[in-house]
Image (cartoon, rainbow, N blue to C red):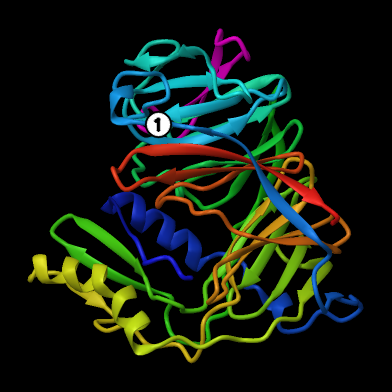
Amino acid sequence: MHRIPSQSVFTLTAVLATACSQDDAPAADFMIGYEGVTPVTNAGPAPPARLDLVVSIGPKTLTDTGSPDEFGRVSSVALGPDEEVFVADRLNREIRVFGLDGVHRRTFGRMGEGPGEFQSLNALAWAGDRLLSFDPDQGRIGEWSAAGEWLGQRTNQTGVTGTPENLRLYPVGPDEVFRRDLELRYVGMNSRGETGDTLASLRGPSSGPPAFIECRYERSLALFEVPFAPRFLQHPGPGGVLYSALTSDYRIFVTRNDGADVLMVIERTLPGESFSDDEWRAANEEYYAWRESRRGASCDPREPTRPAAKPFIEDLFVAPDGKLWVEVVRTAGNRWEVFDTEGKLLGSVPAPPRGPYVVPAFGADYLLTIRRDSLDLDHVDLWRLRRGS
C-alpha cells in the first residue's frame, strides 16, 4: 500500500531559504558508481520474525472523555530509559507518560512561552538521560528529566512551519540526536550540547520525472508528493554518517563526508510491483481537490507524471540501537524489514497501520506507531520485534 500524498504548507520565506540550500547541496554521485565497495546483498526469504503488540494507549470507548489517554493530537512518541512511553500531545501542549501496562503515570508541560511551556510541540527524543522536546514556534529545544523536571533549553531557528514528519528530531544512538536546520543540514546533539557533527543534506539524482508538484497560492507554497514517484530519502546515522536511498531501487548507501566516502551499500532482492488505474486516480484525489479549491494556484508541473511501477521503499529510519528499519512497499501490505549494523537482514514483518503526518519511533527491538481510528482519535501502539520461529 502506498500512502495518499500529503501536502505541506510552509511560510514562503522558509521554503525559499531551504530550496536555495538544496540547490547547493552535494550531488549523490555515489549512487552511480561506488568502486571498491562490495554491496551487502540480502536475497531470498527473510529470517523468521514477528511484531508482538505490547500495549495500545488510547481511549477504548467514547465514555473515556477527559481521560489521560484521550489525546488531542499526538505528534511524537519516545520510549524512555525505564521503558516508559512518552507521548507529545501537540494540541494540548503537554507530555504524557505511560507505563508498559498502559497506565498513565504523570503529565508535564503546558501552553505558554516560559520555562517548561510550549507554543508548539513537534517532537521528542532521548539524549542520554535527558528528554529533548522540539518547539519550532519558539525556536527552542527543551531539556527534561524523566520525572518531568525542566532542565533548560537550547536555541533553534524560528520562522519555520510544517508537520511533525517534516520538523522533527532524529535519535540515532543512546546519546546522539540530530536536528535539521534551515540550510537542510543535520546538526548533531547529545546530552551535553551540540556534538560538532554536521551532515550536509545531499541532492538526489536529477534524472527522471519530478517527485513533487510545487504549487504557489497567494503567500503560501504547497508541496504534493507525486504518487509512486521515485523519491530520495535520507536519515542521519551514528558517528556522523548518512543513510540514503532512491525509493525506486532497494539499495541503501551509508556515506560520510558529504557522500564522498561510501562505507557500505545494502541491497535487497525483491520483485517489482505495478499499480492499477484506480490506485493512480485515488492517490491523486487530494492534489486535484486542493487545486480545484484554489483556482488561482500556479502548479509546476501542472499534472503528475505516472511512474512505470511502485517504489520499493516508503521510508527508512536508523534506530537508537543502530538497526536500520526500512518500510517496504508491497501490494499485499507494507512491511518493515530490519537490518543489523553490518547490513544483514534480521527479519521482515507486516507494517502496522500508522496515521498521517507523524513518524514512528524506535527502541531496542521496539517500534512505536501512532494510529488514528475511525473516530479521528489517536492511539499509541508499542510493538516488540521477536526474531526466530
Marks counted in the figure total 1
Where residue 135 appears, as percent x and y from the top left, is: 43, 29
Which span is picked out in magenta?
137-157
Question: Would residue 102 be counted in the magenta stretch?
Answer: no
Question: Would residue 155 be counted in the magenta stretch?
Answer: yes
| Front residue of this view, candidates 22 and 238 | 238
**Amino acid tagged 1:** Lys
* Residue at image mark 1: 60
Measuring 65% from the left and 80% from the top, which residue is drawn there? Answer: 249
Q: Quadrant of residue 41?
A: bottom right
Measuring 54% from the left and 18% from the top, which residue is drawn there? Answer: 103
Q: Is residue 372 visible?
A: yes
Vertical position of residue 213 compared to residue 50: above or below = below
Vertical position of residue 247 compared to residue 69: above or below = below
* Secondary structure found at label 1: loop
Where residue 303 appears, as percent x and y from the top left, is: 27, 84
Where residue 75 appears, as percent x and y from the top left, is: 43, 37
Measuring 56% from the left and 70% from the top, which residue is drawn there? Answer: 232
Q: Quadrant of residue 223?
A: bottom left
Measuring 89% from the left and 59% from the top, which residue is drawn there? Answer: 342
| Front residue of this view, candidates 49 and 319 | 49
Mark 1 residue crowding within 10 angstroms, few (<14) / some (14–19) / many (20+): few
Q: Say whether residue 339 is left or right of residue 293.
A: right
Vertical position of residue 55 compared to residue 219: above or below = above
Where residue 284 appears, as percent x and y from the top left, is: 29, 75
Q: Say whether residue 270 is left or right of residue 207.
A: right
Instruction: Give the position of the C terminus as an image quadrant.
Output: bottom right
